[in-house]
Image: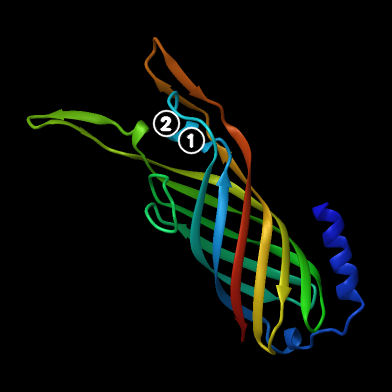
């Protein structure tokens, strides 16, 4: 259904007048609000005790350089705080992606596909931190994780003014988790590695320079 709707939008865009502003002003800078649903992430946070998805919200910044009307280099960074935007998941998270965006546009709207490799950073896995004994008791640290990620999806842009852009991103963020062997040698807990699909949506505003 998403692919069909995207194809219809592209056809509509192609039949309308071209936006000449891209040839004059190639750089776009903006910010956005984003939300990602991390598939089966509860098990990775509290293995053996919890299960289910985790939805976290964050903010970010984006820079786009238009090579021409149809192709652009697209880069962004996102930050997901641990105690704001209704986030209940422990630990902060960050994303970074740089890749290609390709599609069609006219004076009022644009439709694009994107493919951007990058990284997803997870903070404060308390269940994996090492502990040491002191005269005041045990002190336990936390573990962090940086995983390869790939942002695949679609972008729809609206141009309400000559240099203003309202952008909506919808896609699948693939995250490659490493295999983890936790627990004791008697009762080990093994977290499978590999790619996980995670639905992500963003809404943002940009200005063309």
- In the orientation shown, which residue stands out farthest toward the left? 135
- The answer to whether marks 2 and 1 mark residues whose Cβ atoms lie closer than 8 Å is yes
Q: Residue 95 carries which label?
A: none
Name the one closer to the observer, 177 or 53.
Answer: 53
Q: Mark 2 points at which residue?
A: 46
Q: How many marks?
A: 2
Vertical order, 59 against 182 (above or below): below
Q: Position of residue 136 (x, y in %)?
A: 8, 32
Identify residue for label 1: 42
Q: Is residue 200 left or right of residue 131?
A: right
Question: Label 1's element?
Answer: helix
Q: Residue at x 52, y 29 (%)?
A: 179
The spot of residue 152 in percent (x, y) is: 70, 53
| Residue 197: percent from left, percent from top | 65, 42
* Above or below, 56 relative to 64: above
Could you say which quadrant of the image residue 80 lies in? Answer: bottom left
For label 2, the crowd category at 10 Å Cα-Cα, with few meaning under 14, some 14 to 19 and many 20 or more, is some
Query: Residue 150: image x %, image y %?
Result: 64, 50
With 43 as the anchor, is 112 left or right in this view?
Answer: right
């Amino acid at each position: 259904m998403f692919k069909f709707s995207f194809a219809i939008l592209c056809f509509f865009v192609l039949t309308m007048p071209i936006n000449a502003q891209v040839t004059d002003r190639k750089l776009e800078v903006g910010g956005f609000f984003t939300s990602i649903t991390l598939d089966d992430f509860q098990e990775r946070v509290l293995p053996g005790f919890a299960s289910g998805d985790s939805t976290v919200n964050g903010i970010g910044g984006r820079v786009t350089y238009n090579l021409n009307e149809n192709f652009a280099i697209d880069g962004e960074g996102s930050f997901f705080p641990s105690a704001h935007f209704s986030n209940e998941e422990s630990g902060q998270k960050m994303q970074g992606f740089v890749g290609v965006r390709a599609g069609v546009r006219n004076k009022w709207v644009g439709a694009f596909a994107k493919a951007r490799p990058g990284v997803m950073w997870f903070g404060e896995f308390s269940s994996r931190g090492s502990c040491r004994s002191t005269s005041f008791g045990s002190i336990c640290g936390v573990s962090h994780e940086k995983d390869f990620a790939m942002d695949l999806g679609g972008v729809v842009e609206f141009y309400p003014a000559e240099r203003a852009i309202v952008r909506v991103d919808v896609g699948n963020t693939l995250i490659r988790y490493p295999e983890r062997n936790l627990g004791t040698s008697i009762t080990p807990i093994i977290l499978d590695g590999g790619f996980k699909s995670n639905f992500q949506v963003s809404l943002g505003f940009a200005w063309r320079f």
